[in-house]
Amino acid sequence: MAAWNAAHPSVSGHQGRYEMREIVNTLLCQARTGCQWDLLPHDPPSRGAVMYYLTK
């Protein structure tokens, strides 16, 4: 993860609060089930953080 963060710095300069694995797991779970954001089975990262990486 550290190597990826070094190669892809944040536009705002922050280091990020979430593990990339959690963001990817959230995207895959939502794509697989098609469920609403509030109905995801665990505590996902913030919606804004996930959408940032989805659109990137």
Image (spheres, rainbow, N blue to C red):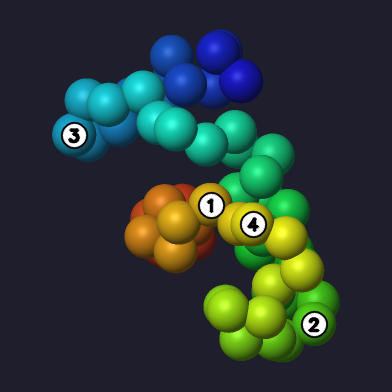
- Quadrant that contains the C terminus: bottom left
Marks 3/4: CA distance? 25 Å
Decide: few, some or many residues near mark 3? Use Cα within 10 Å; few <14, some 14-19, many ≥20. few
Give the residue pinned by disc 3.
12
- Judge from the rendering whether residue 27 lies leftward or rightward of residue 13; answer left or right: right
Q: Are marks 3 and 4 in contact (CB under 8 Å)?
A: no
* Nearer to us: label 1 or label 4: 4
Q: Is residue 37 above or below residue 26?
A: below
- Residue identifier under label 1: 45
Tag 4, which secondary structure? loop
- 1 shown above or below 30: above
Q: Is residue 36 left or right of residue 53?
A: right
Disc ID at residue 9: none
Between disc 2 and disc 3, whose residue precedes? 3
Find numbered disc 2 in the image and state the secondary structure of the residue it sits on.
helix
> Can you identify the residue that label 2 sits on?
33
Depth check: 53 or 42 in front?
42
Q: Looking at the picture, which amino acid does disc 4 mark?
A: Asp
Q: Is residue 6 visible?
A: yes
Badge 2 amino acid: Thr
* Contact, mark 2 vs mark 3 (Cβ under 8 Å): no
- Give the secondary structure at mark 3: loop
How many numbered marks does the figure carry? 4
